[in-house]
Image: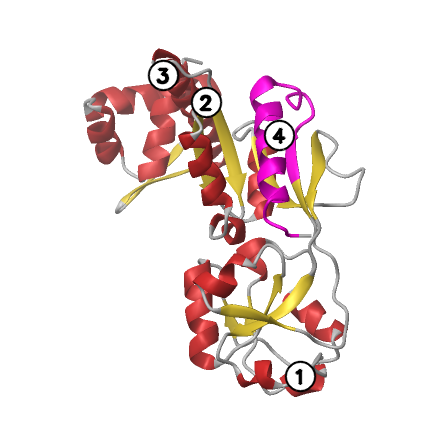
Amino acid sequence: MDPRHLTQLAVIVELGSISRAAERLNLSQPTLSRSVRILEERVGSPLLRRERHGVTPTAIGLQLAQDGRAILDHSRHAQVAAQVWKQGLQGELRLGVEPLLAAAGIGDLLSRSILDNWPYSLSVVAAPAARLLEDLSQGWLDVVIAPARPEGSDAPLMQEALFPDRLSVFAAANDPLHAIPGPKDPALLADRHWIDVAALWDLFGSTRALLDIIGLPQVVPKIRVAADVAMLSRIVTRVQGLCFLPSASAAYLQDHHGLWPVPITTALQNRDMAVWSLRSNAGTQRLVHFRSRLAAFVSGLNLT
């Protein structure tokens, strides 16, 4: 199949319209329609469903569009590689971080790398860890900072310990709970508004499971936040709510977003952080260089 036809199909599916895809690609509608017909003849099946307000892909159309999207992504990566080489750089590093770390000190590391004349360009994506690790396994990212998992899982991927972390209960800085000395009995937290943030940073286990662990099976989280840390902090402050977050990773939130840990009498599970990469790429120069800088940066944060 002609790769151009596949990439054109990918744009059609993305925009849901042949006319809009023609504008995006600077081609005529008859040209795009002809490309689709050629693909359909090769497959022997329709690729698009014509609907009132555009088009949607059939099952095989979606599969071929995903192949076309992969071709476009590889082309973009090749273009970036050529551009950074012209600028005297040695390549691009594609980094994935989860939203909590993206809102924390990782920006300081990246800005420091730029100021220190690091010889690579940086492309940074913030997303939940599960999605980042999937993108890493597909080769769309070079390295991911995400929670550690039990050894032996995710065979194509490797993880290296970055820093230890443990889950804690967090509340707004002005919450009256902070005035109560010592660890708090979880029973004191039963009547609070609990915010479920599992989708924000990929809690391995749910907020519901953690509430059970601390002895609050009757509590139902009323709000689920899967947006960003700034929104989370505003909600927690406005409703005097509570949520579970990893302590070390969320340390930055204390001064910048007004969220502080509330010690409780029940111990919660570890959520250590790791640096993830493909085993086949782990020894490349840019990854070795990045991991070295990252380890030095983390050691100066006193997270342990």
Q: Secondary structure at mark 1?
A: loop
Tag shown at residue 292: 4
- Say whether residue 158 is left or right of residue 36: right
Q: CA distance from mark 1 to mark 2?
A: 49 Å
Contact? badges 2 and 3 (CB < 8 Å)? no
Q: Mark 1 is on which residue type?
A: Pro
Quarter of the image where the N terminus is located: top left
Q: CA distance from mark 1 to mark 4?
A: 41 Å
- Say whether residue 107 is left or right of residue 299: left
Residue of label 2: 120
Above or below — where is 246 with respect to 58? below
Residue of label 1: 181
Above or below — where is 161 with respect to 211? above
Q: Earlier in the sequence, mark 1 or mark 4?
A: 1
Q: Mark 2 is on which residue type?
A: Tyr
Q: CA distance from mark 4 to mark 2?
A: 14 Å
Residue of label 3: 4
Contact? badges 1 and 4 (CB < 8 Å)? no
Q: Secondary structure at mark 3?
A: helix
State the residue at coordinates (18%, 23%). Answer: 28
* Residue 264 in view, yes or no: yes
- Give the magenta range: 275-303
Q: Secondary structure at mark 2?
A: loop
Dot 3, crowdedness within 10 Å: few (<14), some or many (≥20)? few
Q: Earlier in the sequence, mark 2 or mark 3?
A: 3
